[in-house]
Image: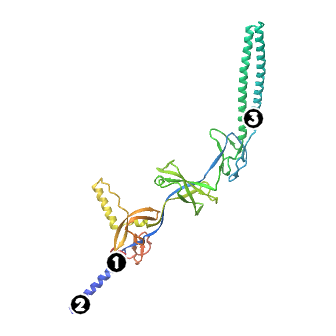
Amino acid sequence: MKRKIAVIAAVSVLVICIGLWIWFRDGNGNNKYKTVPVEKGDIVQTVKATGNIQPIDQVEVGSQVSGRIIKLYADYNSPVKKGELIAQIDPVPFQAKVAQDRANLKQGQAQVEEVVAKLKQAETELKRDRDLATRGLVSQSDLDASVANRDSLAAQLKLARAQLEQDRATLEISQTDLGYTSIESPVDGVVIARNVNEGQAVVASLSVQTIFVIATDLSKVQVEADVPEADVGKIAMGQPVSFTVDAFPDETFNGTVTQVRIAATTVQNVVTYPVIISADNSSKKLFPGMTANVSVEVDRHKDALKVPNAALRFKPESVIAAQKEEASQENKNDSSEKHSPPEPEVWIISDGELKAITITPGINDGSFTEILKGDIKEGQEVITGILETTTDNTSRSSGEKKNPFMPTMPRRSRVPHLH
């Protein structure tokens, strides 16, 4: 009888132990790991940047003379042809100046003709006086006076001719200024900016005042993107680019890197370099000044072995604690020895236990990282995070937020379990 009671008691204890083991194994708070299979596929590394859309070539049309705008023949978005009249400055003052300079030129021509006639007469008289002097009929002083008169008139002729050239140049300048009052388009294109109104006075000073800005061809545009110095070394001419604009958020536009400029810009201690991207705009959807969100493809590997970036970030709590303890101990020892950073690794579940696999990473696209070397194969499950078990025995990700208004059961002791 006692033996039977002892057997029953032993069986009861065994059942209770098994029940407790099952309870603690599947109870609240046990660690279950989220795994993802290693896969093969294309991986593209990109550099992100922002920039502005600009015409490939634009011309600022200004005024080279001062005056009042009496007529505008072009406006915003107006197509214009080379040589077409697009604005008119009041020409009346310039016409009067041309008339005055033309009269001065005629006066100068008359003066030249007058001096030429006097010079001919002086040379004739000098020749006669020389003939008479040889026969003793004219004194030497009279002969010298004739020579001086001839030389004086010759000098006056040179001066009159120089003044005539000056008057001619002044007239040419006046005529040129009169031509500048009619402002013509220097290129074929589209007006994208107009900076004056009819009746407004423009002043030509050291810098030409801009009246119109004309884009030569909007069927092609360029994007000037500001790339940080940490990424500019990856950019090269000919790389493919995709970008979006806020006006068409669901549409992607394509382009090509055409230039990497070395003119650096520093804003709030951040150094950036302008990268020029050419793009087709035959649809005319892209307007100058739009903000472009640029993605430059700097590298592409096909059929690469890759894992989610979360797999490289995952570390078991015990490893994290050990690393913290080691770092704390090094700080206490104040060691000057530099330790190399830990090698990248991913974690798998092997025979019910966690196992770290050291890898050599390649390029990454922000979501996945290429594996160049490592004892890992396609289809093998790698750990990307921890799943927590809720009180109703359902699993949720460690990153998922719990409803604070839901009632919870009292927590029991945790027993780690590999799943």
Q: Do labels 2 and 3 touch, CB within 8 Å? A: no
Mark before the other along the chain sequence, 2 or 3: 2
Q: Quadrant of the N terminus?
A: bottom left
Mark 2, Cα crowd under 10 Å, few <14 / some 14-19 / many 20+, is few
Count of marks, rendered view: 3
Residue drawn at x 78%, y 21% as measured from the top left: 117
> Relative to the observer, which residue lies in front, 221 or 161?
161
Identify residue for label 3.
98
> Relative to the observer, which residue lies in front, 264 or 83?
83
Residue placed furthest toward the bottom: 1
Residue drawn at x 74%, y 40% as measured from the top left: 91
Q: Do labels 1 and 3 touch, CB within 8 Å? A: no
The picture places residue 123, in percent across and down from the top left corner, at 76, 17
Residue drawn at x 34%, y 71% as measured from the top left: 354
- Residue type pointed to by label 3: Val
Q: Secondary structure at mark 1?
A: helix
Distance from disc 1 to disc 3, alpha carbons, whole Å, reads 105 Å
- Residue type pointed to by label 1: Arg
State which quadrant residue 281 falls in: bottom right
Nearest-to-viewer mark from 2 and 3: 3
Identify residue for label 1.
25
Residue placed furthest toward the top: 136
Q: Quadrant of the C terminus?
A: bottom left
Query: In the displayed structure, would residue 93 be above or below residue 111?
Result: below
Q: Secondary structure at mark 2?
A: helix
- As drawn, the label of residue 5 is 2
Residue drawn at x 28%, y 56% as measured from the top left: 332
